[in-house]
Image (tube, rainbow, N blue to C red):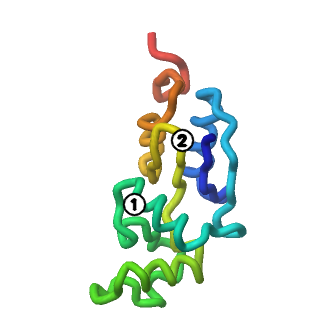
Amino acid sequence: MTVIWHNPNCSTSRRVLQMLQDGGEAPEVIDYRRTPPDRETLRQWIADAGLTVRQALRRRNTPYDDLGLDAPELTEDQLVDSILAHPILLERPFVRTPLGTRLCRPPERVFEIMANPPAPSTPDGQPPA
């Protein structure tokens, strides 16, 4: 089962969702801002993606600075608490497939965990010659 933690307002997230669909996936789409994961799931996905909680934080267009989340003394548990209180702090999109979990930035990272990634295209959207 493929799952994407998705923000429909994010062009990167929309692009990754389209890449999954182009590869024949029918992912479960979770708007993590409306339906945030529980603590254990959040920590597990971040760890499975090979990241620290700090690496999974989104700074732009979030309360990151207002909350002082750049303070080095904050523990991973405190950072998780912040994400749970403000899900928009979680970078996106996270994708989980049977082949692994990735934070798909850049979007092409999703190909690493797709069984049938779509064929690459040229900048004009056409298949390569």
Check disc 1 and report its element: helix, strand or loop: helix
* Residue that extends furthest to the top in the rendered view of this protein: 129
Q: Residue 26 placed where, x, y %?
A: 69, 36
Q: In terms of depth relative to the viewer, which is nearer, 41 or 5? A: 41
Number of numbered discs overlaid on the protein picture: 2
- Residue at x 39%, y 60% (from the top left corner): 47
Q: Residue 1 placed where, x, y %?
A: 63, 40
- Residue at x 47%, y 89% (from the top left corner): 67
Q: Is residue 126 above or below residue 112?
A: above
Residue that carries the numbered disc 1 in the rendered image: 47
- Residue at x 53%, y 49% (from the top left corner): 95
* Amino acid type, residue under disc 2 in the picture: Thr
* Residue that extends furthest to the left in the rendered view of this protein: 72
- Residue at x 51%, y 28% (from the top left corner): 115
Residue that carries the numbered disc 2 in the rendered image: 97
Label pair 1/2, CB-CB below 8 angstroms = no
Q: Residue 65 placed where, x, y %?
A: 43, 85
Q: In terms of depth relative to the viewer, which is nearer, 72 or 125? A: 72
Task: Categorize mark 1 by other alpha carbons within 10 Å: few (<14), some (14-19), many (20+).
Answer: some
* Residue that extends furthest to the front in the rendered view of this protein: 40
